[in-house]
């Protein structure tokens, strides 16, 4: 927008809240210490709608244990990052947040649930994955078990890496964080699985 002060400057708070709800799956209003002062939920997904109860909690409390440092970094640099929330069944909900300072020490964290994007991007690969699993199990009795286990482990590792890259929109730094790996370890595994050229580096 070229002239937000002129076109949006007089908007009442309730209208701004509706805009945030329409633009995001989860929108948080937090302070510099990470306390959640308000929440807007624009998704019908039960796991996402649980965020409506986060008001008054610390942002670090509603993400996975490995995400605390990412929250702390977000509050300092106020840029963007993917965080993993955990639903009541223990399933991860990856949300991509972009932070926007709104004055008086308050920050709007506008988040999008990445699962629908990841599901769409996974579809073309599912057939190949199933075929690879079938090929591996078809070798039972023909090759030693340790070789099958190694093959299956490599297959699962590749699937996890591809899923992390899909969730983070091919951002290798975020994917490494999601997988609990250093960047160097992830790059090594990408090369080993032949994935270095199939994914753009969006760091």
Image: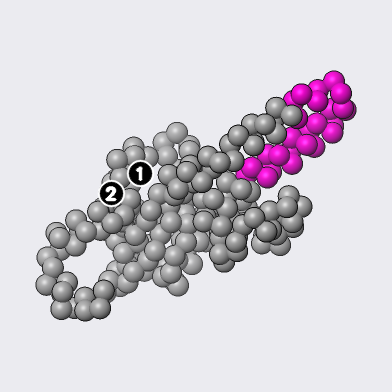
| Up-down relation of residue 144 to residue 191 (above or below) | above
> Magenta residues?
136-160
Q: Which residue is mark 2?
A: 41
Task: Left or right? Give the position of 95 relative to 182.
Answer: left
The reply to whether residue 56 is in sight is no
Residue 154 in the magenta stretch? The answer is yes
At 74% from the left and 25% from the top, the residue drawn is 137
Q: In the rendering, at what x and y percent does residue 36 appear?
A: 32, 57
Residues tagged 1 and 2 counted as in contact (Cβ below 8 A) = yes
- Taking the spot 86% from the left edge, 23% from the top edge, the residue there is 142
Check the picture and name the quadrant holding the C terminus: bottom right
Which residue is denoted by mark 1 in the rendering? 48
Instruction: Tell which of 12 and 52 is nearer to you.
Output: 12
- Which residue sits at x=51%, y=50%? 167
76 lies left or right of 164: left
Report helix, strand or loop for mark 1: helix
Quarter of the figure with the N terminus: bottom left
Where is residue 147 drawn, in percent x and y? 84, 33
Task: Describe residue 179's horizontal placement relative to residue 54 as left or right.
Answer: right
């Amino acid at each position: 927008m070229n002239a937000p002060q002129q076109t949006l400057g007089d908007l009442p708070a309730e209208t701004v809240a509706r805009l945030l709800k329409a633009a995001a799956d989860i929108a948080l209003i937090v302070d510099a210490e990470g306390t959640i002062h308000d929440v807007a939920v624009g998704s019908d997904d039960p796991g996402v709608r649980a965020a409506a109860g986060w008001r008054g909690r610390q942002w670090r409390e509603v993400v996975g244990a490995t995400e605390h440092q990412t929250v702390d970094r977000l509050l300092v640099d106020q840029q963007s990052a993917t965080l993993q929330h955990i639903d009541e069944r223990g399933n991860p909900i990856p949300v991509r947040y972009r932070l926007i300072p709104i004055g008086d020490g308050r920050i709007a964290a506008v988040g999008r649930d990445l699962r629908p994007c990841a599901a769409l991007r996974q579809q073309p690969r599912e057939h190949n994955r199933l075929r690879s699993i079938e090929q591996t199990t078809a070798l039972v009795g023909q090759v030693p078990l340790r070789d099958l286990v190694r093959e299956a482990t490599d297959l699962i590792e590749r699937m996890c890496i591809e899923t992390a890259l899909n969730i983070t929109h091919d951002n290798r730094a975020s994917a490494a964080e999601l997988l609990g790996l250093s960047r160097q370890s992830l790059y090594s595994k990408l090369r080993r699985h032949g994935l270095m050229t199939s994914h753009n580096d969006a760091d």
